[in-house]
Amino acid sequence: MASQDKVYQPKDAVTAGITSTLITGAAGALVSSVQNTLTKQNVTAWGIFTRTGGTIAVFAAMGGTYQFTKLASANLREKDDSWNTAIGGFLAGSVLGMRFRTMPAVLGYGAGLAVFLGTFDYTGGVLTGYEKDPSVDEYDRKQQLRKNRRIPISETINDLGEGRGIYGPGYEERRRERIKQNYGIDVPAQSMLTGRRDEVGR
């Protein structure tokens, strides 16, 4: 059956960007509060905005930039792949590098985060290993894996030869003919079957 091309469905990049900005901004506020608590000076609770508020801004800007750029790139390219993640990671990393106010930091942080996120998405995007398809039965999946790894008997015989429990079709007849040709002994078929059972039993 011919595979059908998957039609890309556009996503709302603006809404996703705003949502991501709020979520990462909240995470930045939590980190900022920890930073404010660990300062040696006696500061008020407003210090999370006045003293370490830059952390909130960086978190919010990185999250919003990454999510918006990722979905906007997917909408423009009409493809949902790892390149969108890498592009979003580059711009998000560049936002982090802007804190150092040098171009090498902007490019370095952008490239580093792009490679990390792009590779992570390309390899499945999960830390627990390969994600199994929930619609496929576990028994059928394992049977398919066995079929993919199973070597044909003809290839095994060519590599190892017959014997030691490995026998191809017509083995008894070929062995009987070799014994008769080499030793002049006519072995009955029943004796060959009995000898093979004894060999397998050993």
Image: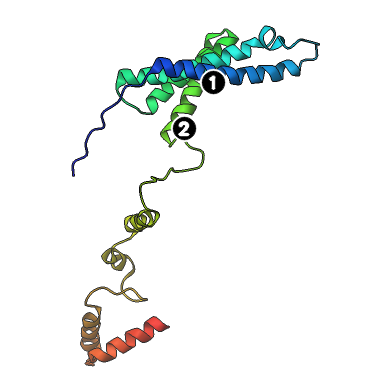
On the rendered structure, is 115 left or right of 154?
right
Kindly identify the residue that appears in the image at 80 percent across and 14 percent down: 40
Disc ID at residue 23: 1
Residue 44 lies, in percent from the top left, at: 76, 10
Q: Tag 1's secondary structure?
A: helix
Which residue is depicted at the point 43% across and 37% down? 124
Whole-percent x and y of residue 12? Answer: 37, 18
Q: Residue 118 falls in which quadrant of the image?
A: top left
Residue 70 visible in the shown view: yes
- Please name the amino acid that badge 1 sits on: Ile
Quote the CA–CA distance across marks 2 and 1. 21 Å
Quarter the N terminus occupies:
top left
Give the side of residue 6 with respect to residue 165, left or right: left
Q: Residue 63, image x and y in percent?
A: 51, 19
**In this rendering, the label closer to the viewer, 2 or 1:** 1
Residue, x 54% and y 20% (percent of image)? Answer: 23
Work out whether 152 lies above or below 145. below
Q: Quadrant of residue 30?
A: top right
Hey, which quadrant is residue 8 in on the image? top left
Judge the density around disc 2: few (<14), some (14-19), many (≥20) Cα neighbours within 10 Å. Answer: some
- Asked whether the beta carbons under mark 2 and mark 1 sit within 8 Å of each other, the answer is no
Question: Which residue sits furthest left?
Answer: 1
- Residue 194 or residue 44, whichever sits in front: 44
Please state if 17 lies on the left or on the right of 175 as rendered.
right
Position of 41 relative to 164 (above/below): above
Which label sits on residue 120?
A: 2
The reply to whether residue 93 is in sight is no
Near-viewer residue (171 or 194): 194
- The amino acid type, in three-letter code, at marker 2 is Phe
Q: Nearer the viewer, residue 23 or 197?
A: 23
- In the rendering, at what x and y percent does residue 163 appear? 33, 76
Q: Residue at x 23, y 89 (%)?
A: 189
